[in-house]
Image (tube, helix red, strand yellow):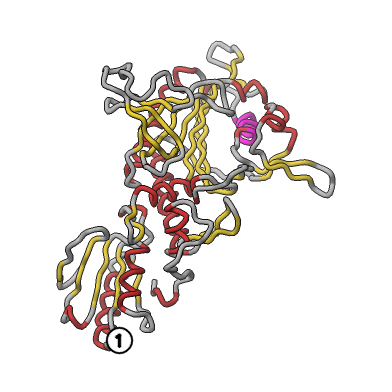
Amino acid sequence: MRQSELFGKTSKTSEGSATSANHDLLVRAGFADQLMAGVYSYLPLGWRVLNRISDMVREEMGAIGGQEIFLPALHPKENWQKTGRWDSMDVLFKVKSRTESEYALGPTHEEVIVPLAKKHISSYRDLPRAWYQIQTKFRDELRAKAGLLRGREFLMKDLYSFHASAEDLKSYYEKAKGAYTKVFKRCGLDAIIAEASGGSFTKEYSHEFQVATENGEDVIFACACGFAQNKEIAKVRAGDACPHCGTPVKELKTIEVGNIFDLGAKFSKDFGLKFTDESGKSKEVIIGCYGIGISRLMGAIVEVHHDEHGIIWPQEVAPFAYHLVSLGDDDEVYEQSEKVYEQLSKDGKEVLWDDRREASNAEKLADADLIGIPTRLVISPKTKGKIEAKKRGAKESKLVSNI
């Protein structure tokens, strides 16, 4: 991609509405544009990152048997009335059509996936099953803030698993924990698995995946041994002895990047989702729910991986692997740059080439730091036919003959 043709420009100044690092940097670097509070447009750089994360999630969901589907975002009121959440869920966006019919814009998809499962699950032979989607969700947040971390419209992956027994769900639940840990590690994040209540979705237990950062909105109490609890349900406080190892527990500010729920048979009861076991007895299907906010995760990565100059993307989620920067207005520099650009592209290496002749050297280097692509390649009259390679965030660079 030639930067001269890229949709989206960088900015030196922050938006007045920016209240978080991820909002400020993603907008200034040309990854996203805020339409209104809690709602963003994603420009090519941002969309590439979201697709990187989505594809990574697809790989890990596939590894635990998840099959990808795509469900409607517009839900009939009747389904939400069956679960009792039409009136009880305060973040539910409600829409009335010209025919006076009422609908919900999906904040989650139990009200859609369970009736669908009822058409395909009737016997123990049909279990277990695991279906997931990556789709836009809507939540009527009173205070949409912190950039991508608390939105009214956002991209989310939700997986639902269906089981014949609580024991089988527990086994799959642990597999999902492992898959989630891999996703976050590949995103460059050290996620802490914290115990949490079921929240508004279920009265059963749940777990949250939390990333420690000073800009986090959540608070957890955690120990290095692996014990962690969300502050809202915590039985310990900072300084208390860890119930697992006795070490003093620490209080951490965090960002929630994923959660998993044991829904039990709650939604199966609501929609009459049952199966016939091997003895011919009718039983309710046990369900698990597993969510990752894809756009929220992008925001969390930026909150953790940035410095005073801009974003520092981890390799696997970066929009490009290389940022090729041509300095000066020397024809030989641009001829060499074009050859390097074409060779990298031919080798399957994704590169953003800053080929803008009208931009100053200082502007190009500042933009490279702001955008945060992992490896910067500089060609200038000073490199004398070689390439100056520098990792984003590193202090030193080196001259190389080829990449």
Residue under the image location 40 percent in, 23 percent down = 171
Q: Is residue 98 above or below residue 203?
A: below
Q: Residue furthest right?
A: 99
Residue under the image location 19 percent in, 71 percent down = 388
Task: Give the mark count.
Answer: 1
Q: Quadrant of residue 11?
A: bottom left
Residue 17 versus residue 346: which sits nearer the camera? 17
Residue 23 versus residue 295: which sits nearer the camera? 23
Q: Which residue is mark 1?
A: 329
Q: Residue 326: x and y, percent?
A: 29, 78
Tell me if residue 118 is in the magenta stretch: yes
Judged left or right of residue 120, residue 19 is left
Which secondary structure dominates the residues rendered in magenta?
helix
Residue under the image location 63 percent in, 24 percent down = 273
Q: Residue furthest bottom?
A: 331
Kind of element beneath mark 1: loop
Q: Residue 330: x and y, percent?
A: 27, 87
Q: Residue 240: x and y, percent?
A: 33, 19
Tell me if residue 85 is in the magenta stretch: no
Judged left or right of residue 102, residue 37 is left
Quarter of the figure with the C terminus: bottom left
Residues in magenta, as a range: 111-120
